[in-house]
Structure formats: C-alpha cells, structure tokens
Image (spheres, helix red, strand yellow):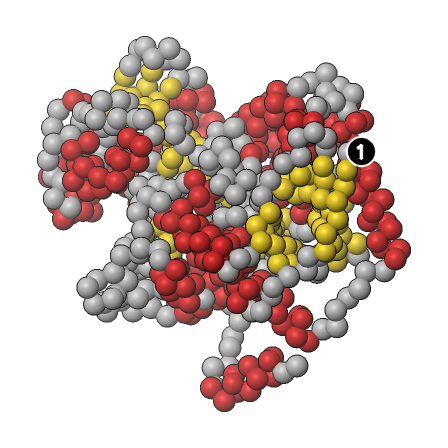
Amino acid sequence: MKIRELKIENIVIGTGAAGFQAALRLYQNGERDLAILAEDVNAGTSRNTGSDKQTYYKLSLASGDLDSVRTMAEDLFAGQCVDGDQALCEAALSSRSFFRLTELGVPFPCTEYGEFMGYKTDHDRGRRATSAGPYTSKLMTECLERSVKEKNIRIMDQMQVIRLLVKNREIYGVLCLDKSEKEEAGYLLIWCRNVILATGGPAGMYHDSVYPVSQLGGSGLAFEAGAAGKNLTEWQFGLASLHPRWNVSGTYMQVLPRFVSTDGDGGDQREFLMDYFETEEEMLSMVFLKGYQWPFDVNKIFGGSSVIDLLVYQETILKGRKVYLDFTKNPGGGNIPFEKLSQEAYDYLKQAGALFGTPIERLRQMNEPAISFYQDHKVDLYQEKLEIAICAQHNNGGISTDAYWETRIQGLFAVGEACGSHGVTRPGGTALNAGQVGAVRAAEKIRLRKLHEKKSVISNVTELLLREEVREFVELPKKASGTIALGGLWKKAAKRMSACGGMIRNRENLESALEETEAELEGYLKLVKCPSEDQLPMFYRLRDMLISQKVYLFAMLDYAKSSAGSRGSALYTDKNGRRPDLKLPELYRCRLDQGMHGGIIQEILLNGLQCSSEWRSVRPIPEIDYFFENQWKAYRDREKV
C-alpha cells in the first residue's frame, strides 16, 4: 500500500455537465490551482442518459411569451419545499447559463432570426422548455469538456474519492483510491481549500433504475462528513425501458403504443390496460397524457394519467409479470378512434400530422430520432417489443446548501443532482439548469471568500488528526472477515431499496428496510469478504451506498411518521385513505398531502451511525430593492478588496 500526497486549492469531483461547468467558472474567476477528479471521465448521468427529447428549462426567450425572473422563481418555488433564494438564483441565472452553453456549441434550435423558442413541459405553466434532442445533456457535457481541455484544466481520471477530510465543519482535503494502480493498493491524499461535489444523485441505491449503470453517486461521502440531507424523500419515478435504460416519456407515449403483459417466460401475452377503463378512448387519452405527465405523481392517480404507472407496477411488482410497449400495432389491434380522443390529444396529433397508422409510423412522423436511439442500442422498434418498468429517475432532494450552493461545511459545495435544490415537483428540465446555475454560484462564493477573507491555514494538530483518520480508513479493507461477496450484498440492498423506498411506501416496510440496512452497515466488516486489490473500489463504493440508503430510509420513515400524506412521486399507503379506483388493489389506498407541508423542509444529519431529523420553514423568495443606484452601490461594495 502506498499513499501519495498533493496540494491543490480547488477540487471538483465529477465530470458531468455540472462538474465541468464548475471548473470553467472557477477558471473564469481566475483560479488556476484547480483539478477535476473522476472515477471514470466517460461515466455518469449527464453523458449517458436522455429521453425522447431531453429538456432544458430556462426563461422564455422567443415570440410574445410573457415571462420574468420573478415569475419563473415563483413557479419553481411553487413546487413545494423549495428554498426561495435558490429558486430566484435558478431563474435569474437561467438565461446567462443557457447562452453560455449555446456559445460553447450546444445546438439548441432557434428561429432564423435567433429566437430560442420553447415548448411546455411537465409542471410548467409556460413554454420555457427547450431541447437539443435525445442527447441534450450529453452534448452539453461534450462541449463543456472540450472547453475544459482547451484551457488545460487538469483532469485526474481513475480517482475514486472515498473520504472527505473535515474538522470543525471545514473541509481540508479528499482521500482517493487510485484505480490506475494495479500492482498494489494506491491512495492519493489531496490537501485542498474548496471541494465542489458534482457526483450526481445516489443512483446505485436502487435496483429498478433508469440511471445509466455507470452512475452510482457519492452522497454517503457528504453525509459521513457532516453535510445535511434535504428533501431526501423526494424522487422521480416513471416508466422506463430496461434494455437499454431510457425514459419512455414524451413522444413514446403520445404515439399511443400497446401495453402488453406476459408471464416470466414471455408467454400468456395480453393487453391489460382496458381491464381498468370504461372506454378505449379514455384509456388512449390517459396514455397520451403520460407523455406530458411522465413522472409518477400521486395528484394524478385519482382520475389522472398516473393510474398508468399503478397498473404497470401492479403487473410487474405485485403479479411478477413483465410489461412491454409494442409500437408495431395499435392498442386493440384495430384503428385508433382519433376523433373520440380528448381534445388535447386530438389537437396535438393533428398538428403533428399524426392522425394515421400504427404507433411506429406516428413516432417516425413526430420524432424519428427517438427510434434511432433504440436502433443505436440494437433494438428495432419496427419489429421488437420494448420491456419497461417503474424506475427511479431523479432525486429532487439531496445535500442541503445555501444560496451559494455551499453545505453546512465551509468550503464544501454541492452542485447538480447531488444538491437538493428541487422540491416535491419541478418542471421538466430544471435539473440541467440548476446544475449550471449551481456551478456559477459556487465559483462566485469561492471568489468572494478569497477576495474578503484571510486564507485559513491548517494547524499541526488538525493535520495530525486527519492523517490518523486517513491511516485508519485505508486499513478498513484488511479488517473485513465475512463470507458475503460484495456484489451479492449490493444486489440484495438495491432490491430492498426499490421494494421499500420506491414509488409505493409503507411504514412497516420502511422500518424493516432501515433495520436491515443499519445491521449491514454496522456489521459491514464482519459480513463482507476481505477484498482483493481489484475489489477495493466495490468495497468502498458499497459502504458509501449503504450509508446513503440508511440516511434516505431514515428520512422516508421519519416522513411516514409525520402527519403528512402522499406527495410527489411517493405514495405512502394508508388503509384509511382513498383508493384511486375500485378496480385497483387496497395497497393503493392513500391520503394526499394537499400541500399542507409544502412550506416545511425536512433535513437529516448523520452523526457517527445515528441519524436525526430537523424540520424547518422554507427560505422565502428574497424581496429585492431594485432601485438601480442602490444595487450598483451594493455591487461595488461586494467587489471591494
């Protein structure tokens, strides 16, 4: 075993759209003592995910659409459990961040006169959404990476961050497992002043997931270091294909495919949606709406389109069957009664010139790149059915930060999906905007602190304590003495999380899952086999995942014990609640939150192996004095050395 050491003032962890932008903003602000750490530069969600037309959400910038920073901030704030200062930042900086991307080469479409027109997305009152196609975040990441390389910003690949070094709520360094070392275990200790976490959401916690396999997250690092979790109960779940992992939102639903259920071996094929609807046109209209309303939403289960999610969940989870989308034939095998569809569905399909043919023919007419994506992944929608399930897609919660995206630990920032700036619901595409805005704000706080504050110097005592912490941590693998394979424990834990902490939750299952997770975490070294050198990444990664699961399950159970009801993408079962439909099982009985707790945020702290919760009011949208001379003076005061 060997431990190398470096001193680098600013560290960015993660090479997605948020991480690369954070590095570029630091560089723009004059920071040159800077490095980006990546476990695998080509991994992560930004580079490896998308949808039928992946959305970026920003201020309206075309035609006569009326919009303002305040209006957009209020719409974000209305998503419940959102801090108003962050909503204002995400609105105010959306245009600046968007234009930065267009100037770097992201091909967002515009009119011949340069207007960046938009469309309506889920939870959106206007037309703020835009898209560069199915691979919007991939294109963003590639353009940002190209700019990073042009500036010769240092990228350190094959570095798995396994520990944040914190004392007295201040960051002093990061410890990495050097995965490029093949002969013996190699570690890199980097002493630093600022760390920007851009590690994405803790996707590895769930077995049923639309996240790319390469996206695992690293939130356990922050929780163990003392950062607080915020709105951890709030996820997005929705229909997704399993092979490849991809959201079947938007056009995939709007072309009205068949939903086919089979037994485990592919036999006993049957369309099952009509068992729960009175008329074919009602069923088809609900399928169409799933395109707009893709994430599961408990507010849309009573006579709304989210009943489709419940029906798929019932087939796959409760009955143990498989569900497929079939684009080769119309539902029922006949012609679609277009004139009997809801007015919204009929008008949309008519305007798209798609009142004809089969689902695949309509998809080719409306969004041919959506077909090409599956062809690129060896799936021919012209001939093959597409297996789907309800999958975890995005964490609206995450690490708690202030309006500069700084955690309660000085010098530790969280941007992108790692940060919990979203609330219960959010307009589609806000995540990409939030990641870019968070990068701007974190870099700005680092610049201002450097401008106004004397640089802190690590004391000899603190350095000695942290070095001892590092020595003890790198010795952990040698102390493992169990019999369970790391991969086996991972699969068991991930399946448990999907079953108990997914779309459908109840208090008893959460209690059981939390107890099992705590037992595995506390007895980790006695359970798992002593890892070989090439198993060290999994050894540390599984430990981090279990920490995240513990904190998230604690948050969900704490919420279930409160007086709040079901909200967002989580249905908390309540035997005294309403049943969405008499044809649906008792399991789906629930009581809606009705927004009563929308002004209260749940935060979770991990101290050792013990969790605690704190509930606080949201920070309101700031009331700003917009008189120019007053703000000009305030700006000059901030810039004074």
Spot the residue most to the bottom.
629
- Which SS class for mark 1? loop
Position of residue 261 relative to residue 195, above or below, is above
Query: Which residue is depicted at the point 68% across and 76% down?
Result: 452
In the displayed structure image, the side of residue 145 where residue 6 appears, left or right: right
Question: Which quadrant of the view contains residue 242?
Answer: top left
In percent of width and height, residue 604 lies at 66, 47
Residue 527 seen in render: no
In the displayed structure image, the side of residue 51 where residue 400 appears, left or right: right
Question: Which quadrant of the view contains residue 157?
Answer: top right
Question: Looking at this view, is 36 or 134 the one in front?
Answer: 36
In percent of width and height, residue 432 lies at 44, 53
Q: Which residue is mark 1?
A: 475
The amino acid type, in three-letter code, at marker 1 is Glu
Query: Which residue is depicted at the point 19% across and 32% down?
Result: 359
Position of residue 556 relative to residue 172, above or below, is above
Residue 609 seen in render: yes
Q: How many marks?
A: 1
In the displayed structure image, the side of residue 385 where residue 104 appears, left or right: right
Question: Looking at this view, is 433 or 570 the one in front?
Answer: 433
Position of residue 191 relative to residue 508, above or below, is below
